[in-house]
Amino acid sequence: MKTVLVLGGTGEARELAAALVDLRVISSLAGRVADPKLPVGEVRVGGFGGVDGLIAYLRAERVDAVVDATHPFADRITANALAATTATGTPFLVLRRPGWPPEDGWRYVDSVAEAAALVAGRRAFITTGRQELGAFTGGVARTVDPPDPPNPRLHVVLDRGPYTVDGEVRLMREHRVEVLVTKDSGGPMTAAKLTAARHLGIPVVVVRRPPPPPAPLVETVAEAVEWLTRGSGAG
Ligand code: NAP
């Protein structure tokens, strides 16, 4: 049976692991979240130890194909996966959900730090994850696990999607939010905040994605299954 390594940490990675029934699938998680939602099947947790560690892992497990289904902003593991699969000649596919279609009132920036500078002095609703929160001066940050490092100037709400529009409107009103800060993560899991911001007339600062790697790329789980079973993957 062919072995596929799915680099995960996203809903799409869990869906892909569930959809691949006739292959041996190993799902890999970074181990950042204390209580992660686990994919079905075989799971390994923790870094590989850079490119060399990943090369050794691909060889030891006799991996036939790698699907990078990590978050669009997890660019180090993506770069490592590209380098390791190139070195070993392992077929490599990137599964990236599309970003959100831009709307009026959205301002794009290139980094979380740039977003923090732009919203300084305003009560922001910050949804960019628990890292890189140090530069924000005020507002509410929503994270799955507590911010690292902590930022005493922010009110923290610990929660995990999917979210509802009503819930997001309530939260933004309760904290008298003046601006929303988000990564261009895409997908439905966290999109309710964007609808809520539109309803409330709140401007949105969107952190642009890092560029995709130079590798075959698909946007849906179905396309990834197709690639693995019929295309240049492990099928
Ligand atoms: P990153 O900066 O791209 O990766 C940093 C290091 O973490 C990698 O070099 C690798 O360590 C390890 N790593 C990352 N993803 C891994 C995986 N799926 N399996 C094994 N090791 C992994 O990653 P990140 O941005 O911190 O994201 C970490 C995880 O959280 C990813 O799985 C990602 O899908 C998920 N996530 C990230 C975001 C985000 O905004 N960045 C949002 C939601 C979910 P070694 O070099 O030791 O192999």
Image (cartoon, helix red, strand yellow):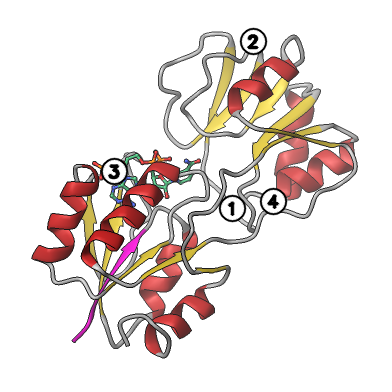
Identify the residue position indicated by label 1 in the image: 162
Q: Name the residue nearer the viewer: 165 or 46.
A: 46
Q: Is mark 3 within 8 Å of ligand 1?
A: yes
Residue positioned 23% across, 43% down in the render: 50
- Residue 207 drawn in magenta: no
Amino acid type of disc 3? Gly
In the image, ligand 1 is in what quadrant?
A: top left
Counting from the top left corner in percent of width and height, residue 42 is at: 22, 67
Can you tell which of label 4 and label 1 is closer to the viewer? 4
SS under mark 2: loop
- Residue 2 drawn in magenta: yes
Identify the residue position indicated by label 2 in the image: 137
SS under mark 3: loop
Residue positioned 48% across, 50% down in the render: 71
Amino acid type of disc 1? Pro
Can you tell which of label 1 and label 3 is closer to the viewer? 3
Magenta part of the protein: which range? 1-7
* Residue 41, placed above or below residue 38: below
